[in-house]
């Protein structure tokens, strides 16, 4: 699928869809529970469907008529008779690996080319440390993974470059017969672990943490059914937020967002404000009015998913913008640092790749033929660039937006974006 984009001015209001991260945690915890849970306003996307499909074959009964109703398997997942295809969803792969550590096994987890390129060695090691049996089938720390039970508890030290394995372990260790201690010396993406801790707290799970380095989880616990409205997704909101901030004529209201939620990408609003965008918080939502922006240094350690969009913003800010402390953006669906550097250069951007980020200088962008590399956040970021560049921009692999933000094109067109999707 190809996206055609032309220079646009955005005005109006949109409601942001539900959070992918919250939805997947909700599906996993509801599946572990003994009883029926109800998810209100969940995100129906390719990533969330990957977790739903996996939990179904592991024994959860899931109805998706409007709100989702999930009858859990009470902490005792079945061993699937076939491989579980988690498609492009790294979040689902990490959380489902934790479930598989409580099945007799073996459970084999696989995915698409992008998922098969991502590192899972830290999680494999941690599961083995805690008593389960886990291995990378190709032997390089990547999927397919073969996992069987039973997770017993104990001690493990795990690299914190990716927060998802840490969150997976926090949930899974509650079901282990013995207590567990997880030491994470350098935890990135801390807000996502805090999100998991929020879910544990709502479930009454007994755990403790010290300086976001040492996590202790009491064993022998269980999860209970719940009813919960899934919060809106700040990661998805990043794209219309940045698109409106770039254009001085734009005025957009984003509805449904809760600034009290744990999501790390809520800081994007403050980052844009720091650069000079006019952003206000009210009862209706977050309003952003475009303005002349100034380059600055932004630490993205806790918000790596914002790198693609903020790299585009940097092209329209006076002076120099530095995105730093975000080396973990290289282990997402693509190496997002290398990808955004390469694609923005095709548009005439003055951009430089760093080991842990990017340097972007104000540039006069022009339309170009771009490749989104099947990365949803790259596709959406390049669409923002096209909305503010001279001429027409073409973005290949535009179908990737279905991973987290299926209505993106329709919502942006509703705000005035000049977009056309070609099959």
Image (spheres, helix red, strand yellow):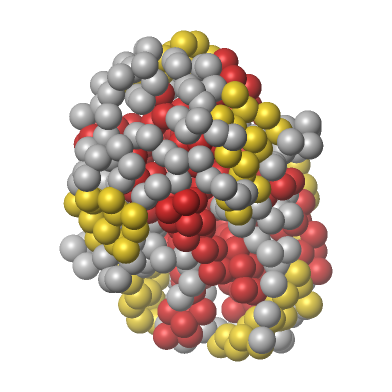
Horizontal side of residue 300 vs 230, given as left or right: right
| Visible residue check, residue 164 | no
Q: Nearer the viewer, residue 314 or 276?
A: 314
Q: Is residue 158 above or below residue 61?
A: above
Count the labels in the image: 0
- Quarter of the figure with the N terminus: bottom right
Task: Name the residue: 52% across, 63% down.
Answer: 46
Of 264 and 252, nearer the camera is 264
The percent coordinates of residue 378 (x first, y second) are: 64, 62
Going by the image, does 39 lie left or right of 21? left
Task: Determine the residue positioned at 58% across, 56% down.
Answer: 310
Q: Is residue 102 above or below residue 65?
A: above
Vertical side of 10 occupied by 380: above or below: above
Provide residue 180's location: percent of width, then percent of height.
41, 14
Kindly identify the residue that appears in the image at 59 percent across and 61 percent down: 377
Residue at the image point whose x is 18% and y is 63% from the top:
283
- Residue 398 seen by the camera: yes
Q: Quadrant of residue 198?
A: top left
């Amino acid at each position: 699928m190809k996206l055609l984009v032309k220079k646009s001015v955005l005005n109006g209001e949109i409601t942001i869809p539900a959070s992918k991260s919250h939805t997947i945690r909700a599906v996993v915890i509801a599946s572990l529970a003994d009883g029926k849970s109800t998810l209100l306003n969940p995100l129906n996307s390719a990533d969330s469907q990957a977790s739903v499909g996996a939990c179904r074959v592991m024994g959860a009964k899931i109805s998706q008529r409007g709100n989702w109703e999930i009858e859990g398997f009470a902490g005792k997942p079945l061993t699937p008779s076939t491989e579980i295809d988690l498609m492009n969803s790294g979040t689902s792969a990490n959380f489902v690996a934790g479930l598989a550590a409580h099945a007799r096994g073996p459970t084999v987890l696989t995915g698409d080319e992008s998922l098969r390129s991502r590192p899972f060695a830290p999680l494999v090691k941690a599961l083995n440390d805690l008593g389960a049996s886990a291995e990378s089938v190709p032997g390089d720390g990547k999927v397919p993974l073969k996992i069987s039970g039973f997770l017993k508890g104990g001690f493990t030290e795990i690299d914190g470059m990716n927060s998802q394995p840490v969150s997976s372990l926090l949930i899974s260790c509650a079901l282990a017969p013995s207590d567990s201690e997880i030491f994470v010396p350098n935890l990135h993406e801390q807000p996502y672990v805090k999100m998991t801790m929020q879910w544990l707290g709502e479930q009454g799970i007994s755990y403790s943490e010290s300086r976001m380095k040492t996590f202790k989880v009491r064993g022998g616990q269980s999860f209970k059914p719940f009813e919960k409205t899934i919060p809106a997704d700040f990661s998805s909101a990043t794209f219309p937020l940045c698109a409106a901030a770039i254009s001085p004529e734009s005025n957009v209201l984003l509805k449904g967002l809760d600034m009290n939620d744990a999501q790390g990408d809520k800081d994007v609003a403050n980052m844009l404000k720091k650069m000079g965008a006019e952003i206000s918080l009210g009862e209706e939502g977050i309003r952003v009015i475009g303005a002349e922006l100034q380059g600055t240094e932004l630490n993205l350690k806790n918000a790596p998913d914002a790198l693609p969009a903020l790299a585009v913003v940097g092209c329209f800010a006076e002076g120099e913008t530095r995105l730093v402390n975000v080396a973990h953006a290289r282990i997402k669906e693509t190496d997002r640092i290398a990808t955004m550097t390469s694609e923005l250069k095709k548009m005439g951007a003055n951009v430089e790749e760093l080991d842990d980020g990017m340097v972007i200088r104000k540039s006069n962008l022009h339309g170009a033929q771009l490749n989104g590399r099947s990365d949803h956040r790259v596709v959406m970021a390049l669409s923002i660039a096209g909305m503010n560049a001279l001429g027409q921009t073409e973005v290949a692999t535009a179908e990737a937006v279905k991973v987290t933000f299926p209505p993106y094109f329709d919502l942006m067109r509703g705000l005035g974006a000049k977009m056309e999707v070609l099959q």
